[in-house]
Structure formats: structure tokens, C-alpha cells
Image: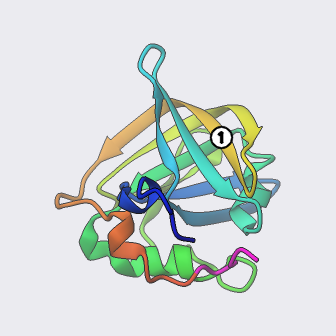
Amino acid sequence: MTDPHGFFDRLDPDMCLVTAVAGGERAGCLVGFASQCSIHPLRYAVWLSKVNRTYRVARAAQYLAVHLLTRDQRDLAELFGGETGDEVDKFAGLARREGPGGAIVLTDAAAWFVGTVLHRTDGGDHAGFVLDPVRWGSGRPGPLLRLSDAYDIDAGHPVD
């Protein structure tokens, strides 16, 4: 999609990796639409594509974990953005631990937080999840992975 007015084509947000656990299932995906949406109280919103498995699991999740990746973690970006959890166990062999509500925290992330899902909203081909951060941490130094670093990853569940 080309932005005829030059606004959206100029955006280059940090990418994040979102994990969800519900009903005995776990899922995760690479997300390009996310941002802080309130200062007091602190809130963060992530937008999940309705065609991917993470959205299906997140609809029933009470908590989501949001992770920032560094540019040298492109392999994780390719795994979570270019594969589908319907066919691949994305978590096999990854360093992780359990967070609040059973959320999956990837311990090698640059930074992460687990948030309680406060609201879900329809946004077209994506659904928004407004989160109340309840636990967070950081670890890996380095510049963050941005949209321009991940632009050529073919989505595991491409949009029609």
C-alpha cells in the first residue's frame, strides 16, 4: 500500500513481539502497530492482525506480554513475523519464563512488560488491545528493531 500523501510511508516505529496464552494455547507475533496511549494511568496499546493465530489466542487472554527486540535479533523477528503458530512451535528452544497470569516472557528481549488486557477494540483488519502494565524488565542492550529493519519479512498469515 502506498500512502499518496507521504505521511504513513514516512513512519518507522519500533517493532515489538507480543505473546499471548489462553485456554492451554500459546501464540506470539511480530507487531508494527503499538504505542503508549496514556501517561496517567500508564497504558499501552497493541494492534493484532485478525488473520493471525496470536489474535485468536489473545481474544481470550487476560494478559499479554510485549517485548522489544534489538536489530541483531532479526532471527526472532523472522520467526514470529514470518511463520505461523498454526504450523510451527515458535517457542521451541527459546529462553523464556512465566509472567503474571501465565504470560510468556522472552528473557532475551531488550525490554518487556506484561499487561492486563483492559479493553479490546475493532480497528478494521486489526484489533486493539489496551494494556495496563503490571510487570516489566529489560536486559539486552543495543538499537531497537524498527519497521524498516523488518519490512521485507513475509507475513506468516498474509493479509488478503
Q: Residue 120 location in percent, x, y?
A: 74, 37
Q: Residue at x 64, y 81 (%)?
A: 156
Q: Residue at x 52, y 52 (%)?
A: 33
What's the magenta bit mostly, secondary-structure-wise?
loop
Range of residues picked out in magenta: 155-160
Spot the residue most to the front.
4
Disc 1 residue type (three-letter): Phe
Left or right, residue 155 beside residue 93:
right
Q: Residue 119 location in percent, x, y?
A: 71, 31
Q: Residue 13 location in percent, x, y?
A: 37, 54
Say whether residue 153 is magenta.
no
Q: Residue 26 location in percent, x, y?
A: 69, 63
Spot the residue most to the top.
40
User: Can you say whether 115 is above or below 92 in the image?
Assistant: above
Q: Residue at x 25, y 53 (%)?
A: 139
Left or right, residue 104 beside residue 152:
right
| Secondary structure under the numbered disc 1 in the rendered image | strand
The answer to whether residue 62 is seen in the rendering is: yes
Q: How many numbered circles does the render carry?
A: 1
